[in-house]
């Protein structure tokens, strides 16, 4: 949970926890234990690299709400606005130009909302 809070923010985790129901509790437990307890804590990649990989995977899968959340996480993990742009530019070649175009729109909205651009 500490890593989840560090990457996504206390506010995000608190909102997710508040929305947890009996129906979603097992899923919340699963992502906390495996995504945040097993994968994000492995020593092989630092959080900056994990954020870059995560942004790419979310773009490839068209997971726009998660992309917005992880753009903020990438900034918390030390990626610059320019580096986020480079990651998204890379996705234009490997994920498609239309997909990258949408990813840039999502990221720009998040970064503008947060006063980053």
Image (tube, rainbow, N blue to C red):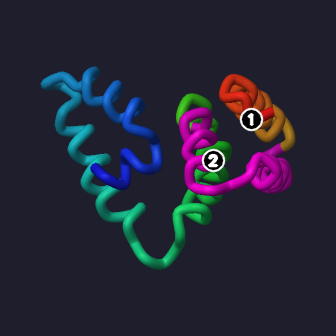
Magenta-colored stretch includes residue 93: yes
Residue beneath the point at 23% across and 26% down: 20
Apparent side of residue 86 relative to residue 50 in the rendered image (left or right): right
Question: Which circle's residue, 2 or 1, is located before the other in the chain?
Answer: 2
Residue 74 is tagged as none
At numbered mark 2, what does the secondary structure look like: helix, strand or loop? helix
> Which residue in the rendered view is the most extreme toward the front?
115
Q: Residue 81 versus residue 45: which sits nearer the camera?
A: 81
Element at label 1 = loop
Q: Position of residue 62 (x, y in %)?
A: 63, 36
Q: Is residue 88 magenta?
A: yes
Q: Residues within 10 Å of mark 2 (few under 14, many from 20)?
A: some
Place of residue 81 in the rendered image (x, y in percent of width and height, measured from the top left): 77, 46
Query: Which residue position is annotated with label 2?
Result: 75
Extreme residue toward the left, this view: 22
For the record, the magenta segment spans 67-96
- Disc 2 to disc 1: CB gap under 8 Å: yes
Identify the image quadrant of residue 11: top left
Q: Which residue is mark 1?
A: 116
Q: Nearer the viewer, residue 13 or 90?
A: 13
Count residues near mark 1 (Cα–Cα under 10 Å), then give few for <14, some for 14-19, many for 20+: few
Residue 14's spot in the image, x, y percent? 31, 30
Extreme residue toward the bottom, this view: 44
**Residue drawn where x is 66% and y is 46% of the image:** 60
Residue positioned 83% across, 34% down in the render: 101
Label 2 to label 1: alpha-carbon separation: 9 Å
Main SS of the magenta part reads helix
The relative height of residue 115 versus residue 56 in the rendered view (above or below) is above
The answer to which quarter of the image holds residue 35 is bottom left
The residue drawn where x is 18% and y is 33% is: 25
Asked whether residue 95 is in view, the answer is: no
Horizontal arrangement in the rendering, residue 80 relative to residue 29 (left or right): right
């Amino acid at each position: 949970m500490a890593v989840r809070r560090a990457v996504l923010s206390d506010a995000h985790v608190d909102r997710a926890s508040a929305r947890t129901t009996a129906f979603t509790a097992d899923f919340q437990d699963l992502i906390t234990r495996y995504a945040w307890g097993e994968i994000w804590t492995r020593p092989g990649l630092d959080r900056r690299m994990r954020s870059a990989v995560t942004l790419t995977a979310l773009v490839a899968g068209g997971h726009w709400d998660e992309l917005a959340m992880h753009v903020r996480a990438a900034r918390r993990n030390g990626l610059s606005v320019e580096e986020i742009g480079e990651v998204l530019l890379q996705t234009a070649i490997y994920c498609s130009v239309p997909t990258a175009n949408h990813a840039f729109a999502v990221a720009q909205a998040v970064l503008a909302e947060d006063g980053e651009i």
